[in-house]
Amino acid sequence: MEIMNVPKAMEDSWDHFLHNLDEEETDNENRDKTIVFERDSYLNNLLQKVKDNAIYDEHYETRGQRAIGVVYNPQYEKYGNYVPTILPLRYDALLFIDVSNALYPLHIKQVEDKDLPDTFPRGE
């Protein structure tokens, strides 16, 4: 197990945008957000107009979105941890958790079994 400090989000990213959204109205400890993107004919029209550059809406920008997964190295944050994303085209809903803490692994008794995957429980 390794606990990592995640650097601040890059300035033009969705993570930075969502962290700073409504910052005057919320305290620093509660910036979590739930966003549901509705899919209907209005949205389809809006998406077409955005693709045609006919209108501007900040939620339909392509911005980087941080991807922290199994392999993550904070040193390479700006080189490969961001995925170009238009939120409503990628997700039906988004749960943004601004601050979290490391989890602690469950203590699982190791079992010798030839049918268990190599990664159970620790990948050794």
Image (cartoon, rainbow, N blue to C red):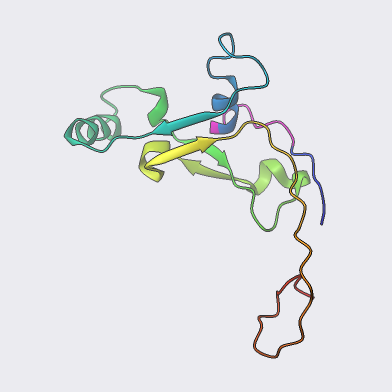
Say which quadrant the N terminus sits in: bottom right
Tell me if I can see residue 92 in this picture: yes
Which residue is at a point 59% across and 23% down the rendered structure image? 31
Q: Residue farthest to the bottom?
A: 114
Secondary structure, magenta segment, majority class: loop
Q: Is residue 48 left or right of residue 109?
A: left
Q: In which quarter of the image is the C terminus?
A: bottom right
Outermost right residue: 2
Residue at 35% x, 35% y is 37
Q: Residue 86, can we see it?
A: no
Q: Residue 18: percent from the left, percent from the top? A: 54, 26
- Residue sitting at the far top: 24
Q: Does the magenta stretch include residue 11?
A: yes
- Residue 78 vs residue 122, the one in the foreground: 122
> In the displayed structure, does residue 47 sit left or right of residue 101?
left
**Which residues make up the magenta segment?**
7-14
